[in-house]
Amino acid sequence: MKLRNIGTWPPAFGGAYQRYSVFPQGEEGVLAGVTKIGAAPLGYPQTLPAHLNLRITYRGHQYDGNYLLGEHVGHIDAVREKLNGCIGQPVHELGDLEIEIPT
């Protein structure tokens, strides 16, 4: 299955900014890092399920985006591993990555 067909691809990237900052739109930028974020522990508000935080560089600045895998959250480690092998690649190329998702 192509990455662009899993969850919320592409993430909406944002971060701290200054006056006249230009934010990446869609699949702009270059992948700089991937971090797995677990769901909140029991007893804490569940603001987001387990997801991946993608860090990109765009026009000399870093931005982060939350990538929610939706019904495929059980395959988060496989997706993370695949993306970790793509550090330094343009985001627009990542959507075409094939991820093995058993049906």
Image (cartoon, rainbow, N blue to C red):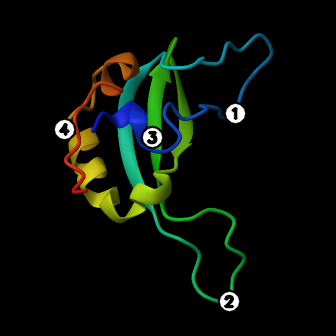
Q: Nearer the viewer, mark 3 or mark 1?
A: 3
Q: Give the farthest residue toward the right.
A: 19
Q: Secondary structure at mark 4?
A: loop
Q: Please name the amino acid that badge 1 sits on.
A: Ala
Q: Earlier in the sequence, mark 4 or mark 1?
A: 1
Q: Secondary structure at mark 1?
A: loop
* Residue neighbourhood size for the residue with mark 3, other residues' Cα within 10 Å, grouped as few (<14), some (14–19), many (≥20): many
Q: Residue tagged by mark 3?
A: 54
Q: Please name the amino acid that badge 3 sits on.
A: Leu
* Residue neighbourhood size for the residue with mark 2, other residues' Cα within 10 Å, grouped as few (<14), some (14–19), many (≥20): few
For residue 43, the mark is 2
Q: CA distance from mark 1 to mark 2?
A: 30 Å
Q: Residue at x 59, y 75 (%)?
A: 40
Q: Nearer the viewer, residue 83 or 73?
A: 73
Q: Secondary structure at mark 3?
A: strand
Q: CA distance from mark 3 to mark 1?
A: 15 Å
How far from the left and from the top, in percent, is residue 72? 39, 56
Q: Nearer the viewer, mark 1 or mark 2?
A: 2
Q: Earlier in the sequence, mark 3 or mark 1?
A: 1
Q: Earlier in the sequence, mark 4 or mark 3?
A: 3
Q: Residue tagged by mark 1?
A: 16
Residue 83, relative to residue 63: is it above or below?
below
How far from the left and from the top, in percent, is residue 51? 48, 56
How far from the left and from the top, in percent, is residue 28? 49, 15
Q: Residue at x 67, y 72 (%)?
A: 46
Q: Give the farthest residue toward the bottom.
A: 43
Q: Please name the amino acid that badge 4 sits on.
A: Gly
Q: Earlier in the sequence, mark 3 or mark 2?
A: 2
